[in-house]
Amino acid sequence: MGVSSVPARFLLVAALVLLCCAEITAAGVRGALIVTIAGNHKLSEYFEWSCKTIGASKDRFDMLVFHESNSKLMSLSCASNVKLINLGEHGLSKAIIAKVLDETTSNESVKGKMTMMLNDIITHGPRYLVEIKPMLGDLFRDHLTAYSHWSYTDPDIIWGNLSDWIEEKDLERFEIVTFAKNNDAGRLFLRGQVCAV
């Protein structure tokens, strides 16, 4: 099933975006699907389905799971294209604060307080991580060097073969490929885009 046979309820929107430029890697196109898991001891039972079923897409996509020393992840049996990346204790908060403040704030005390405040928010309401999804490509840029494209995703997705939806020629031709429901691609957000690194 190619892109031309996508069910009518989906609209494939492909666009070139100058702010998201990249060269296709010498090895060709390969996508990274970014998942963030906050905390070191929580993990939804359904995540194992996600990390197993992404194996159907191993020819073109990897799942990069950024976590904070999550002990439950170590006992999962995931597909070979799942990469577990341990950011350490409070790692998500530290990475976000470091990226947001960048070099504008050199005061380590301020950075530390902001990191702990953000960590409290993420610990008590991990759903707030959704607010930073569009910045994940920039936040984890160093981990995306082997990929031509990236996207964020949720840990509760049952995957199939993404090559049935996103063909290699689409990734070679476009920097962003977006699937949308009910013509919502014209709104001020993108749903589930795959963006060039």
Image (cartoon, helix red, strand yellow):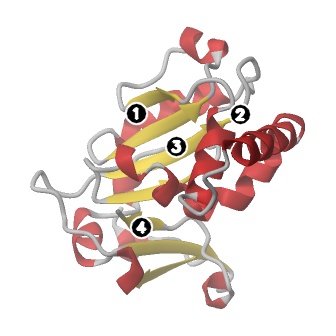
Q: Residue at x 47, y 22 (%)?
A: 78
Above or below for 153 versus 53:
below
Above or below for 8 versus 109:
below
Q: How many marks?
A: 4
Above or below for 162 versus 39:
below
User: In this rendering, which labeled residue sits more in front, label 1 or label 2?
Assistant: 2
Q: Residues within 10 Å of mark 1 (few under 14, many from 20)?
A: many
Is the residue under label 3 in contact with that under label 2 (CB below 8 Å)?
no
Q: Amino acid at mark 1?
A: Gly
Q: Position of residue 134 (x, y in %)?
A: 59, 64
Q: In this view of the protein, which residue sits in the foreground, 114 or 49?
A: 114
Q: Is residue 23 left or right of residue 174?
A: left
Q: Position of residue 158 (x, y in %)?
A: 59, 40
Q: Which residue is mark 2?
A: 38
Q: Residue at x 73, y 23 (%)?
A: 45
Q: Quadrant of the N terminus?
A: bottom left
Can you tell which mark lies on residue 159? 3
Q: Could you tell me how far apart the alpha carbons at marks 4 and 1 are, in whole angstroms? A: 21 Å
Residue lying furthest right: 124
Q: Earlier in the sequence, mark 1 or mark 2?
A: 2
Q: Amino acid at mark 2?
A: Ala
Q: Position of residue 82 (x, y in %)?
A: 42, 31
Q: Residue at x 37, y 76 (%)?
A: 4
Is the residue under label 4 in contact with that under label 3 (CB below 8 Å)?
no
Q: Earlier in the sequence, mark 2 or mark 3?
A: 2
Q: Amino acid at mark 3?
A: Trp
Can you tell which mark lies on residue 55? 1
Residue lying furthest top: 75
Q: Which residue is mark 4?
A: 195
